[in-house]
Amino acid sequence: MQIAKKAGDRGGSFFVRDGKFYTGLAALALPVAAQNIITFSVSLADNVMVGSLGETALSGVYLASQITTFLQMFTMGTSAAMTVLAAQYWGKGDTKSVKTIIGIALRACITVSLLLWAAVFFFPAQILSLFGDDPAVIEMGVRYIRVLSYSYLFFCMTSVLVASMRCVKIVRAGVYTSSVAFVVNVFLNWVLIYGKLGFPALGVAGAALATLIARIAEFCVILVFVLKVDDRLRIKIPELFVRDRILARDFLKYGIPVILGDVFWGVNLMVQGAIVGRLGEASISAISIANTVYQVVSVGIFGTREASTVTVGAAVGALGDDEDREGYNNLKRLVRTLQVIFLGMGLLTSAVLFVLRDFILMLYPNLDAVTLDAAKSVLTVMCITIIGTAYQMSTLTGIVRAGGSTKFVLINDLIFVWTVVIPSSAIAAFLFGAPVWVVYACLKCDQVLKCAVAVVKVNRWNWMVKLTSRKAEA
């Protein structure tokens, strides 16, 4: 049910003035940010330790990470689709439907993870050759991905279960799982990559094995939490296999655009990886470093985005009929406030990254000067684009998509990626032979350009859709 647009606010403040809103948002955002920083610190540790093996090893792992990124984007999309629906049902107080939606998302992710494992395990070299043409780099990537592919199933199940807890505003579960993964992965990296405590030095295969064991450990933690600790949903395993025709249909109708949005974004990143993979080892390593650094420094942005997704979804789900003027005006104040917070997070993250650039690159003493210079130039570009990312990404996915307007975000991403980002970066790389920082700027230009779309769309107030209405009418 599309919520009708109403006149502007009558009375009240322009922004949210209730301190409880800010403390509640922080209570959701900070644990998510903490979880992300722990998770991405694992990636940074992997990146630094593998980087000590040289550019070829780092480049090989980068090629293999393109497949992992695709799976991550599918899982993120499925989890986001689940959150969009489940948060509204949670706001309505329908716990049974929330559990059924979680089951739908979990089964979808398990199926895709198994298919991707089969493809990667049996055809690793053929798949990695899509992203690079250096035989030594591909061979290194094959060593890594053959082991890593066994972690796909555990990663998917963990991600969905952590997101299910976030739907009902239990965010500490993600911190627990990520903490376990961090400790296990970093310790085993040291043991297995370098051959400590009597183990053989396995190099990149050791890094992959450490990640696999860490994924299994974090899955065990979240499973125990969901089944034994959680006191809100109280999920029982049979409840995850309940079939509901209406919810399945709604998941497809409203969730498919969300999933496709993240899947196509994953394809976009894979195409970008194929472009970068043909720029040489120095450029590949530079962007590999930059991507890892981005994950770590942007944790506040993603934490705030995830908190806004749950907050906005629950607020829309709790709205009454079209005459609920008070609820509508409260939602408008909420959205205005979130936009200011998003922009502030972007400026803060940009400043932190700019100050820490040189210190970050000191973590890679074994890389040559050309690679480090390229990485510094890419990080400088990121200081600019990350401001746009913080605003437009959080606004479009944390507000517009969370409010039910899922198709708009999909279409908007497709237009920018395939008419601007990919063509401009390919032309810069292959026609003009531009430096890596120019290619990277083309790859990230949409992050700034989409800000104009985000401003207009969110402030037109035509993106709110009651996703629970069909279930209520059935």
Image (cartoon, rainbow, N blue to C red):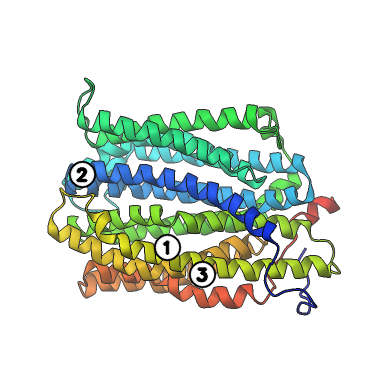
Quadrant hosting residue 470: bottom right
Residue marked by disc 1: 349
Q: Earlier in the sequence, mark 2 or mark 3?
A: 2
- Furthest-top residue in this view: 198
Residue marked by disc 2: 57
Quadrant hosting residue 405: bottom right
Location of the N terminus (image quadrant)? bottom right
Which element type, helix, strand or loop, lies under badge 2? helix
Which residue does the image show at 15% across and 48% down from the upper left? Answer: 366
Residues packed near mark 3 inside 10 Å, few (<14), some (14 to 19) or many (20 plus): many
Q: Mark 2 touching mark 1, by CB under 8 A? A: no
Where does the image place residue 235, in percent across and percent down from the top left? Answer: 68, 32
Which residue does the image show at 55% across and 58% down from the upper left? Answer: 305
Q: Earlier in the sequence, mark 2 or mark 1?
A: 2
Residue 21, numbered circle = none
Q: Identify which amino acid the numbered label 2 is placed on.
A: Ala
Where does the image place residue 210, in percent across and percent down from the top left? Answer: 34, 32
Closer to the camera in the image, 48 or 104:
48
Q: Mark 3 touching mark 1, by CB under 8 A? A: no
Which element type, helix, strand or loop, lies under badge 1? helix
Residue 220 visible within the image: yes
Residue 343, numbered circle = 3
In 3D space, how far apart are the residues under numbered discs 3 and 1 (Cα atoms)? 10 Å
In 3D space, how far apart are the residues under numbered discs 2 and 1 (Cα atoms)? 30 Å
Q: Identify which amino acid the numbered label 1 is placed on.
A: Thr
Quadrant hosting residue 357: bottom left
In 3D space, how far apart are the residues under numbered discs 2 and 3 (Cα atoms)? 37 Å
Residue 114 visible within the image: no
